[in-house]
């Protein structure tokens, strides 16, 4: 038991458990994590503990985004766009793509690469315009 009151029935018979929950970044895989949930023993009402769950959700989403980046880069390489070529066309610093795969990546990186993966023809057009 934890010192919580059920918002539905007012009982203090509330237990905290850690159900398996799922999140997914755009273009990334569905990943599971152990969330937090409070469940009323009396009325079976359940409510999530979002403040505890927040960092776990964020970290799991980051992992899904990173996998999305890796998958997009792998795919684009099979289309003739190796990391160095992408960096040249998109005018971003050398070794940035490698860094995105293993270390830090900026917000939106996964979505940008996901769009390019869906429409690699955009890269061809960008390349011609340079
Ligand atoms: Zn209750």
Image (spheres, helix red, strand yellow):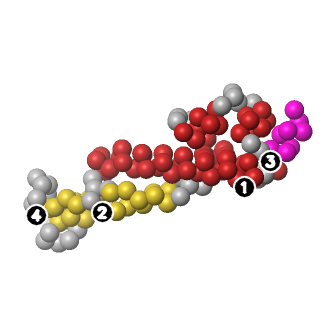
How far across and how far down the image is residue 52, in percent?
Answer: 28, 47
Horizontal side of 62 relative to 112 (left or right) equals: left
How far across and how far down the image is residue 30, in percent?
Answer: 49, 60
Quickly name the residue at label 2.
19
* Structural crowding at the residue carrying mark 2, measured as other residues with C-alpha within 10 Å and reported as few (<14), some (14–19) or many (≥20): few
In the image, 86 versus 3, the foreground residue is 86
Q: Is mark 4 within 8 Å of ligand 1?
A: yes
Alpha carbon distance from label 4 to label 3 = 60 Å
Closer to the eye: label 3 or 1:
3
Alpha carbon distance from label 1 to label 2 = 34 Å
In the image, 122 versus 94, the foreground residue is 94
User: Does the rendering let one see residue 78?
Assistant: yes
Residue 53 is inside the magenta segment:
no
Closer to the eye: label 3 or 2:
3
Alpha carbon distance from label 3 to label 2 = 43 Å
> Are dots 1 and 4 in contact, CB under 8 Å?
no
Question: What numbered label is drawn on residue 13?
Answer: 4
Q: Quadrant of the N terminus?
A: bottom left
Quickly name the residue at label 3.
80
């Amino acid at each position: 038991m934890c010192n919580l009151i059920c918002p539905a029935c007012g009982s203090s018979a509330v237990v905290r458990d850690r159900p398996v929950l799922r999140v997914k970044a755009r273009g990334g895989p569905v990943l599971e994590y152990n969330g937090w949930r409070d469940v009323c023993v009396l009325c079976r009402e359940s409510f999530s503990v979002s403040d505890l769950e927040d960092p776990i959700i964020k970290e799991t989403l980051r992992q899904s985004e990173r996998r999305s980046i890796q998958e997009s880069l792998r795919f684009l390489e099979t289309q003739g766009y190796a990391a160095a070529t992408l960096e040249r066309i998109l005018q971003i610093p050398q070794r940035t793509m490698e860094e995105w795969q293993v270390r830090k990546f900026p917000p939106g990186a996964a979505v940008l690469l996901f769009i390019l993966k869906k429409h690699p023809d955009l890269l061809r057009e960008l390349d011609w315009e340079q």
